[in-house]
Amino acid sequence: MDVDVKIPAALASECGGARHLTVTVADGADLAAVLDRLGQAHPRLARRLRDEAGQIRRFVNVYIGDEECRGLGGLDAAIGPGQSVQILPSIAGGA
């Protein structure tokens, strides 16, 4: 199954400037499998998304369709046919 992964401009340099990537995973795969495949192709991007323990970094939000992955089971969240994954770094600011 092919999964479309949307990359934010802030991280595009970590994957050759691409803003959309397609990764192929087995049917019924979870988010971890998608990020593993993405990391195989783009190791620099993988280091920005996951920590040393393999968990999604706290300042990175990953959406499956319109739902943030942490509410769907995190890395165990199922990816269905036709669903896309969107990566968004958290934005913080102050005065």
Image (cartoon, grey):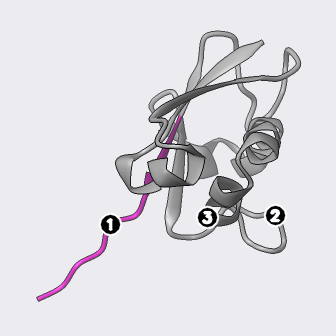
Query: Is the residue 51 above or below the residue 72 in the image?
Result: below
Query: Is the residue 18 above or below the residue 47 in the image?
Result: above
Give the labeled residue for mark 2.
54
Task: Give the x, y percent position of residue 42.
Answer: 70, 47
What amino acid is found at the position of numbered circle 3 in the picture? Arg
Q: Which residue occupies 32% across, 66% down?
A: 91
Point out the tag, 3 or 1, that comes first from the N-terminus: 3
Q: Which residue occupies 82% across, 44% down?
A: 40
Point out the tag, 1 or 2, that comes first from the N-terminus: 2
Main SS category, magenta section: loop
Give the labeled residue for mark 1.
91
Part of the protein shown in magenta: 86-95
Task: Give the x, y percent position of residue 58.
Answer: 57, 70
Mark 2–mark 3 Cα distance, whole angstroms, equals 11 Å
Q: Is residue 71 left or right of residue 79?
A: left
Q: Secondary structure at mark 2?
A: loop
Eye-nearest disc, 3 or 1 = 3
Crowding near pointer 3: few (<14 within 10 Å), some, many (20+)? some
Q: Which residue occupies 61% across, 10% down?
A: 82
- Quarter occupied by the C terminus: bottom left
Mark 1–mark 2 Cα distance, whole angstroms, equals 22 Å
Task: Give the x, y percent position of residue 65.
Answer: 51, 27
Point out the tag, 2 or 3, that comes first from the N-terminus: 3
What amino acid is found at the position of numbered circle 1 in the picture? Ile
